[in-house]
Image (spheres, grey):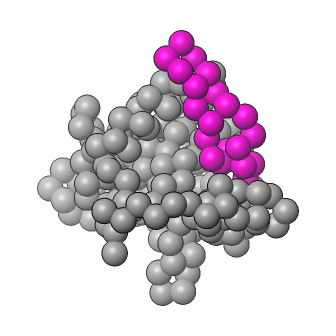
Amino acid sequence: MNNRPARPTNYRGTPMRSRLEATYAQVCDQLGIAWSYEPGALASEIGQWLPDFVHHQSPMSAWTPNCIGYQDEHGNWIEQEPGPGPGDIERMPIIEGLLDPAGTWYIDVKPPTHDRTRLANDIRRWHTIATSCDPNAIVAVAHPRTSNGMPHTIAFGLDPAGESFGCVIGGPLIWWFEDGEDGLIDLLDEYWPRPR
């Protein structure tokens, strides 16, 4: 595993701890998504967490989605127009929760070299800390990338109710959901980018 040290970078006057964080901020700016960098630590009885980025408005509401997609229990892609549809009624509260402008997103930016089990455990711990401070907290890890010249970010995390999700911010609006205790690890194992 290649664990290169982070290189502090100044992005538009904001000192950041790594170039990856600066890339995330740049992608957000290109997509018109407002962000705050390390605005403050969250604390609860289990510890503290300093998120890299906070979005006080859902990054999903920065554009009009063309479609919502998810994988069913058989691994088949389901793509549909926004709004409830056949077979998706139970998923709509999750989707609406992630699109809700009132929900605050707390993001940690990570490289693909991070261990997926550790990422899942970190997300669960951060989610516990964040929701004790903000009941509408959406906690995720994110990795900015470029495909076919288009910047976007993939993010995986837990919604306020603790449901596992994955999404693409800035690319096709694709959603993944997994149920159960291992849902987050399953998502990360399947979709988190691999080191090159």
- The answer to whether 53 appears left or right of 68 in the picture is right
- Residue at figure coordinates x 25%, y 58% from the top left: 190
Observer-nearest of 170 and 52? 52
- Residue at figure coordinates x 61%, y 41% from the top left: 51
- Residue at figure coordinates x 61%, y 64% from the top left: 7
Quarter placement of the N terminus: bottom left
- Residue at figure coordinates x 76%, y 64% from the top left: 10
Observer-nearest of 89 and 91? 91
Quarter placement of the C terminus: bottom left
Residue at the extreme right of the image, as rendered:
13
Observer-nearest of 147 and 87? 147
Visible in this render: residue 178? no
The residue segment tinted magenta is: 35-55
Residue 181: x and y in percent read: 25, 32
- The answer to whether 26 appears left or right of 173 in the picture is right
Residue 90: x and y in percent read: 35, 39
Residue 6: x and y in percent read: 56, 60
Residue 59: x and y in percent read: 63, 54
